[in-house]
Image: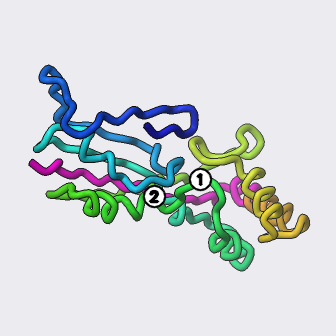
Amino acid sequence: MVSADGWTYRFPTPGTWPAEVEFVKVWFTNRMIFMDTNFLALPTLSRPGGRVAVIDTDWGTLAVDHPDRLLTERLSGAPRRFPLNSWSGRRLYSQMRQVGLSDLEVRVESLVATSWDPDTSPGVEGLPPFAMVAQSAEAMGVFDSDEAARWLGALEDEARAGRFFLMLAMVAVVGTVPS
C-alpha cells in the first residue's frame, strides 16, 4: 500500500488476481510526484500482457519568461522540497524499464500558459500560487525578502502587460506487463 496526498493505493500481491478481474490497462496520473517509490508494484497492477500507463509532471522543466533572468535562474536551479519527487516525469521511463515492463512508449506534452490575471487569480490553474513560490524561495534562502517581492512584482507586471509565458512538461510512459 502507498499513501500520498490523501490518496491510498492498495496494490495486489503478485499472482493473487481473482479469475474475474480483467484489467488490461491501468494508469496513474500526477500521483508519483507525491511518492518516493521504486515502482516495484507496477507489474502487479495488470495481468501478464496488460498495459500500465503512468503520466506525471516533470517539475524540473518548469520555465517562466521573466524580465529578471538572474533571479529566475536562481529559482529554477534551487532544490525543490515539494513535490517530494519533482523529477518523477523524467524518471518514468527508467523506472518502468527497471521493474521489467516492456514495449515502452513515451509521449511528452507541454503545459503552456500565455495569460494570467494576477488581480483575479493567485496563479495558473494546476500550479502553486506565484506568491507561494516567491515565499518558498525566500524561506529556502534562494531570495531575500526584497528579491522575492521584486520577482513576484515583475511577474505580475508582465502578466498585466500581456507578456506572461510559462511551460511545463508532462511525461507519459506506457509499458506491457511481462508474461
**Neighbours of disc 2 within 10 Å: few (<14), some (14-19), many (20+):** many
Q: Which quadrant, please, contains the N terminus?
A: top left
Q: Where residue 55 sits: x, y (%)?
A: 37, 48
Which amino acid is tagged 2? Ser
48 lies above or below 80: above
> Residue at 53% of width from left, 47% of height from top?
34
Asked if residue 127 is positioned above or below residue 150 in the image, the reply reads: above
Give the residue drawn at x 56%, y 54%: 114
| Disc 2 to disc 1, C-alpha distance | 9 Å
Q: Is residue 159 magenta?
A: yes
The outermost residue toward the bottom is 70
- Decide: few, some or many residues near mark 1? Use Cα within 10 Å; few <14, some 14-19, many ≥20: some
Left or right of residue 62, residue 28 in this image: left
User: Who comes first in sequence, dot 2 or dot 1?
Assistant: 1
Q: Position of residue 106 (x, y in %)?
A: 26, 59
Which is more toward the observer, 82 or 46? 46
Q: Is residue 153 magenta?
A: no
| Residue 167 in view here | no
Q: Secondary structure at mark 1?
A: loop
Bounds of the magenta span? 156-179
Q: Secondary structure at mark 2?
A: helix
Amino acid type, callout 1: Pro
Residue at left 58%, top 54%? 84
Q: Which residue is mark 1?
A: 83
| 73 left or right of 38 in image | right
Q: Is residue 176 rendered to the left or right of residue 157?
A: left
* Residue 140 drawn at (x, y percent): 78, 65
The residue pinned by badge 2 equals 88
- Identify the residue at the far right of this view: 146
Q: Which mark is residue 1?
A: none
In the image, 79 versus 16, the foreground residue is 16
